[in-house]
């Protein structure tokens, strides 16, 4: 039995959880239409985890890559060419993903620096993708 997916993502890892959540969008016609002209990368980095997840959208197609985050150079914007970053703990990522945190609670955590965000305009695309998953 192989413990890695087709994208070399270790099963049970943070990146595997993100892939499991977002990769079904590849079969969603509304996603393909809404993001048909978009090309962007969003890095989700749990600072207490072993790997980060790089979500790449390329003209209506989504992939997730696992990135070793033990060395800051591996997740550097210049290295990965990401457009947006969200960095926090695995627990807070889990609370966001499960809907336990409201938008105002997330903003409060950004202001108090419990969540680090770079280029929040692109992070709204995560919300848009999440909404498409719930339809």
Image (cartoon, grey):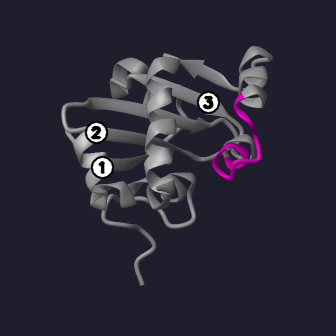
In 3D space, how far apart are the residues under numbered discs 3 and 1 (Cα atoms)? Answer: 28 Å
Label 3: how many residues lie within 10 Å, few (<14), some (14-19) or many (20+)?
A: many
Counting residues from the start of the chain, the first of labels 2 and 3 encountered is 2
The residue carrying mark 1 is: 30
Left or right: residue 124 compared with residue 46: left
Q: Is residue 62 left or right of residue 70?
A: left
Quadrant in the rendering for residue 122? top left
- Residue at which label 2 appears: 34
Query: Are discs 2 and 1 less than 8 Å apart at CB?
Result: yes
Q: Residue at x 54, y 58 (%)?
A: 17
Q: Is residue 101 magenta?
A: yes
Q: Nearer the viewer, residue 78 or 121?
A: 121
Disc 2/disc 1 C-alpha distance (Å): 6 Å
Query: Viewer-proximal residue, 95 or 76?
Result: 95
Task: Assess disc 2: are there few (<14), some (14-19) or many (≥20) residues with their C-alpha within 10 Å of its C-alpha.
Answer: some
Q: Range of the magenta residues?
A: 94-103
Q: Nearer the viewer, mark 2 or mark 3?
A: 2
Q: Which residue has dot 3 on it?
A: 87
Q: Secondary structure at mark 2?
A: helix
Can see residue 61? no
Q: Is residue 132 above or below residue 44?
A: below
Q: Position of residue 93 (x, y in %)?
A: 67, 43
Image x and y of residue 65, in percent:
38, 48
Marks 3,1: beta carbons within 8 A: no
Tell me where residue 4 appears, x and y as whole percent: 41, 68
Q: Is residue 128 left or right of residue 31?
A: right
The image quadrant where one finds the N terminus is: bottom left
């Amino acid at each position: 039995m192989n413990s890695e997916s087709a994208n070399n993502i270790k099963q049970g890892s943070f990146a595997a959880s993100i892939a499991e959540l977002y990769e079904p969008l590849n079969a969603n016609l509304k996603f393909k239409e809404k993001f048909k002209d978009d090309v962007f990368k969003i890095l989700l980095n749990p600072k207490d985890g072993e790997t980060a997840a790089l979500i790449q959208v390329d003209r209506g197609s989504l992939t997730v890559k696992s990135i070793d985050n033990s060395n800051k150079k591996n997740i550097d914007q210049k290295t990965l060419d990401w457009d947006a970053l969200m960095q926090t703990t695995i627990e807070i990522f889990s609370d966001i993903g499960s809907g336990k945190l409201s938008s105002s609670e997330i903003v409060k955590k950004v202001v108090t620096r419990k969540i680090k965000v770079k280029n929040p305009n692109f992070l709204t695309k995560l919300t848009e993708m999440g909404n498409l998953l719930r339809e």
